[in-house]
Image: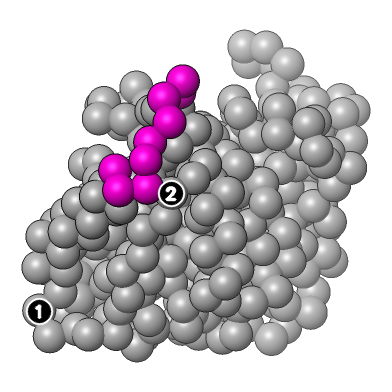
Amino acid sequence: MFKKILFATTASPSCDHAAHVAFDLAKKYQSYLLLFHVFGIPNRGFSQSVVDIRTGQEAPNDSEYESWVIEEMKNTYTRQLGDYPDSDLKTKAGVPHTEILRVARKEDADLIVMGAHTREEEIGASRHRNIVGSTMQRVAKSARCPVLIVSRPCTTCLWYFSNIVFCTDFSKAADYAFKFAFNLASEIGAKLHIFHALDMSSAYSGKTLGQEEIEEQISQAKNKIEKRYVSQMKDYDNYAIDVLEGIPYVEILKFSRKKNGDLIVMAHHTREIDPENAEIGSTVEQVVLRSSCPVASVNRPDKIGTADEPAS
């Protein structure tokens, strides 16, 4: 399913959890793994110096410094590279999200793996602010392939993946996310949990729904899942449908923990708008921040594979 995996790294401890997932996925699917690090942002125009992303210090923008950065990357991932030789390292100066997207297109990557933040000490509110408008957000917004975001140690992953949780809001983007989740589950024999959270946080603000109304909407959502998704699954029967009411991100996280989810798949955004103009949805942000397993953000129909053969 994944012929080429791009691991976008800061080559710092904050990406250790993402590195673990990236290397394990490459081993599992015998993928070519490219480790890519944007080491510095040019000061201005055609400046021959850059601001090193890790240190914040000015550094030369030349081949000698690039070679030094590559050696540092090799030192950082010595053990993993030794265990998995079908990998390569590249580095470049530039705007991080622009360069990551450029190399993903050039290499025709099937999956981008990256961390949710760039500084290990950024937690809580600071960490949340870093996600919005960050490299991760911009990459997820424009990537042609799914983006796997790893925020914490993957405590439930066991040789990837056995329980895939697909969360839908019934948007067009969610249709793409479903195809990715279903194709992956079909290929590896994982159980697919199709989940919808009936949003009680905003849609019914100021209005109290009776239990009968809630149950009716839950029933309608399950019927919609049957028609929209299950109808595409043919003979595949290793799935379950669940609908709960509440605050979406809270219910998604609770459900994933209950089912021992080792991958959550969601649409990149939650509104029926052009993906080029979409911002990452607040539900996705909250899930990424708090999930104990990786979260796959799917923005486009490209690179989602088919149930019969891998994506090209």
Q: Amino acid at mark 1?
A: Lys
Location of mark 2 (residue): 245
Query: Closer to us: mark 1 or mark 2?
Result: 2
| Depth check, front residue: 157 or 165 | 165
Cβ–Cβ under 8 Å for marks 1 and 2: no
For the stretch drawn in magenta, the main secondary structure is loop
Q: Amino acid at mark 2?
A: Glu
In x, y percent, where is residue 245?
43, 49
In x, y percent, where is residue 114?
60, 53
In x, y percent, where is residue 178?
28, 59
Look at the image and tell me whether residue 109 can be seen. Answer: no
Please tell me which residue is depicted at 89% across the width and 42% down the height of the picture.
121
Q: In the figure, 171 relative to 4: above or below?
A: above
- Say the numbered circle drawn on residue 173: none
In x, y percent, where is residue 236?
19, 83
Q: Which residues are magenta?
A: 205-213
SS category of the residue bearing label 1:
loop
Q: In the figure, 154 relative to 207: above or below?
A: below
* Left/right of residue 122 with respect to residue 178 in the rendered view: right
- Say the numbered circle drawn on residue 234: 1
Q: In the figure, 100 relative to 203: above or below?
A: below
- Magenta region includes residue 296: no
* Left/right of residue 204 with respect to residue 247 in the rendered view: left
For the rendered model, the colour scheme is one colour
